[in-house]
Amino acid sequence: LGVLAVIRHVVKTPQGTLNVVFEGLSRVRMHAYAEKEGYLVAHATERKEEEPRPSLFLDSLMQEVENQLEGLKDIHPSFTEEMRIAALAIKHPLALADFVASCALINYKNKQSVLDAVRASTRLEKLLVALGEERMILTCEHDIQTQVKEKIDRSQKDYFLREQVKAIQAELGEDDDDEIREYDEKIAAAHLPKDVEDKLYKELNKLSKTPYGAAEGTVMRNYLDTCLEFPFTKHTNEHATVAEARKILDADHDGLKKVKERILEFVAVKEFSPDVKNQILCLVGPPGVGKTSVAASIARALGRKYARISLGGLHDEAEIRGHRKTYVGAMPGRIVTALINAKANNPVIVLDEIDKIAKDFRGDPTSALLEVLDPEQNKAFRDNFMEMPVDLSDCLFIATANSYDGIPLPLLDRMEVIELPTYTDSEKLAIAKNHLYPKQLKRNGMTKRQVKITDDALLGLIRSYTREAGVRSLEREIASLIRKSAKKIAEEDCRSVTVTGADLEAFLGKPKVHPDLPEETDPVGIVNGLAYTQAGGDLLKVEVAVMEGSGKIELTGSLGDVMKESAKIAHSYVRTVAEKYAIEKDFYKTKDLHIHFPEGAIPKDGPSAGVTMVTAMVSALGKIPVRRDVAMTGEVTLTGKVLPIGGLREKTLAAYRAGIKTVLLPKENLADLDEVDEEAKAHLAFIPCTNAEDVLKNALLR
């Protein structure tokens, strides 16, 4: 179909074209075309429209057309709000369809499809389809145009701001070129290894092409600054001789013979072979025995820089290896940071509390430490932030730990372990006199003339006010004495105060620690055992009570699984020797045993109380007294063999302090007597035992 129209207005434009306004009269069906005098003539018949019958369906279609026009002006290039209002005023379905098609449709095919429809419902349906299709296309075009416009506006804004920044920098005399030139000069002056220098120049080239203010520019500057601070070629020259190192170590610490000897061996080897690889040392000992402080003394003795890394509670592998530099807030790992802070590539690095490293979903830091502590691998340690190999082979790593329990075996295998034993009373006295007392005097602003603490007062502090392997509590008590003395000087207007052993109770109150003493008489069912604890060594009494019953064994005293098993083994062994010690053969059916370890608030565990429990059971069941001046240690098997134990030095010190005369120990531990304190060794008799019979023979009074 076509349209029969009449020309209403013709306007000639300056460009030589004509603008013609037509008025449509009616639809016509085209039959033929003919050319006449240079223009086309159509043969057509008029197509009259039938008046539609009103219906709900037509009303719904008209309402939907009106809904489609809502908001069309925002996306349609030529549709206006006035057109929409005019359309809403039309109530005839055919007229509405024709008006909307002429105003709202853009696509020629869609317009023709509406023109071809004669029935009102068909025309409105085709109009709705065409409107929906074109509305979707117009919406997409509008979104695209909006995005393009936003990008153009943003680019223009960024360009404008950058130009403003450049103008301000030029006015202030600041320029990117100056920054690039400064980095260039720093890299050239650092005399870095070739591969490092090439890497930094590559980063500098990227920085020079990065727009000012871009986020990646900040990342590159941070990376360049960190790499330029790293001591790739800065080395501390070692100048220490064995004699000088010994003098420094002895001045800083009393005791610690094993550690000192190992460091002096290292210094001696360095004199003959400067290129020898550094060993990884691990100092294991109770709290307060000087593990961290002796590491600082080692650095001073070797003439090296000192850096300390606290590993307690560390649970993220990135803390060791560093973060990728592309992340926001990225930084190098603690190893690289320690070298940067030390300003040398061969410092003494202390890995403090290596047994307290944690692990979670973020990784296992101990796995990262495997590479750090392996002399074969750490010459090319890769930190994630640095993105290049870092040589750690010249560093001397010293790890510290309170026990072996928290250190993974692969990590422990890479380290040379040196155990720091408990201090003896004489060693604590020397440390207090030479180090703690002068240190606390200085810290509290006093002098030796003003506050004097006698040796017997210091020994009283050690034995009656502290119970520890190290000297931290001792230092606190000395500090308390000095403060109270200072208060006395200020209040009583006296010049000085001398503190003796008899004055301790007046200054510090009642003694906090009561010594473990043996029984006053030779008891039955009570045996002196020896235990190794975090506080050093303790006299651990084992008590056994026998009652009528059905063979039950009751264990109390906060015992661990190992000690519970030892009790069962001891009970079974006693059954095998019951007849020999006049014990009822069926005691395991008719007698209940209660085995108790005093001080139940303190957890106890370990394989060294077997012989003590055997002796206590035999004594209680056979009613045989036990020598009160004998203490013992050792594990026992079902056949009665006595197995070796650890912590002999600490256990013998505990026996000596308690006034014990004789110590029964496994025969295989005789070689360890060389490590026992000389003063304790002089006052104790040691009897080696191969089996439980040897223990019972020397402990029981028969």
Image: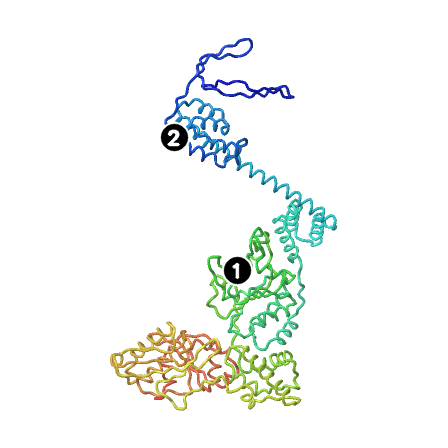
Residue 390, position in %: x, y?
A: 60, 55
Above or below — where is 478 with respect to 98? Answer: below
Residue 375, picture quadrant: bottom right
Is the residue 147 above or below the residue 175 in the image? Answer: above
Number of residues whose C-alpha sits closer than 10 Å to that of mark 2, classed few (under 14), some (14–19) or many (20 or more): some
* Quarter placement of the C terminus: bottom left
Q: In this image, 58 relative to 214: left or right? A: left
Residue in the image at 56% along x and 79% along y:
476
To which quarter of the image does residue 349 belong?
bottom right
Between residue 62 and residue 410, name the one nearer to us: 62
Residue 93 coordinates in the image, percent (x, y): 42, 28
Amino acid type, residue under disc 1 in the picture: Leu
Q: Quote the CA–CA distance across marks 1 and 2.
A: 81 Å
Q: Residue at x 52, y 32 (%)?
A: 79
Q: Residue at x 63, y 90 (%)?
A: 492
Say which of marks 1 and 2 sits in front. Answer: 2
In front of the other: 38 or 692 = 38
The residue indicated by pointer 1 is 369
Q: Which residue is mark 2?
A: 58
Mark seen at residue 479: none
Name the secondary structure under disc 2: helix
